Image (tube, rainbow, N blue to C red):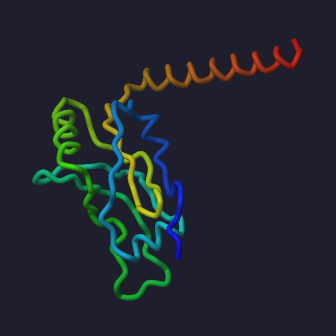
């Protein structure tokens, strides 16, 4: 059977970009069981309340929900189990140096398949204040209005 080509997004955490300002992103593999992979290939996963945590020099993903595989048997996985992330030691050391800063956390941004391998995109994030969120929404709305006016002008409607 030929290997999958390209990138297929399974789940994304859109709320993370709203609640946090992303300082840096990393790509990591995940240590999964067979039924977890099958459930992911079916497009079922949730990153709500998920976060990364360091333990003994390794990074683990807590709180990610992958529902049980429907055709699975007694070998099915636990939906919210802790999953080990596969990163190079240099990446972990660099990440840990930044995580020691006050208010910085590790948030999964999306889960996807890259050429057949399950990957997770992690973001080093710092929490936003409510006024920062309002400011982002206002600037986004202003940008939409500008683009709309430019589109009308280029079509000769104004």
- For residue 15, side relative to residue 145 (left or right): left
Residue 148 coordinates in the image, percent (x, y): 75, 21
Residue farthest to the bottom, as pictured? 74
Q: Is residue 23 above or below residue 51?
A: above
The residue nearer to you, when weighing 147 against 102, is: 147
Q: Is residue 142 above or below residue 89?
A: above
Residue farthest to the front, as pictured? 2
Q: Is residue 10 above or below residue 97?
A: below
Name the residue located 76 percent from the left edge and 16 percent from the top edge: 149
- For residue 54, side relative to residue 65 (left or right): left
Residue 111 coordinates in the image, percent (x, y): 44, 54
The residue nearer to you, when weighing 50 against 4, is: 4
Residue 31 falls in which quadrant of the image?
Answer: bottom left
Residue 122 falls in which quadrant of the image?
Answer: top left
Name the residue located 41 percent from the left edge and 62 percent from the top edge: 117
Q: Is residue 137 above or below residue 29?
A: above
Quadrant where the C terminus lies?
top right
Name the residue located 22 percent from the left edge and 39 percent from the top edge: 95
């Amino acid at each position: 059977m030929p290997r999958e080509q390209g990138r297929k997004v399974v789940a994304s955490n859109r709320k993370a970009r709203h609640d946090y300002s992303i300082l840096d992103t990393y790509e990591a593999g995940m240590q999964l069981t067979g039924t977890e992979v099958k459930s992911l290939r079916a497009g079922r996963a949730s990153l709500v309340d998920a976060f990364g945590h360091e333990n003994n020099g390794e990074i683990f993903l807590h709180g990610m929900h992958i529902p049980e595989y429907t055709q699975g048997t007694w070998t099915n996985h636990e939906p919210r189990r802790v999953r080990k992330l596969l990163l190079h030691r240099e990446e972990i050391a660099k990440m840990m140096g930044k995580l020691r800063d006050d208010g910085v956390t590790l948030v999964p941004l999306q889960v996807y398949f890259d050429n057949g391998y399950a990957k997770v995109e992690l973001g080093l994030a710092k929490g936003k204040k409510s006024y920062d969120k309002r400011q982002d929404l206002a600037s986004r709305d202003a940008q939409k209005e500008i683009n709309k006016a430019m589109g009308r002008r280029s079509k000769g409607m104004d």
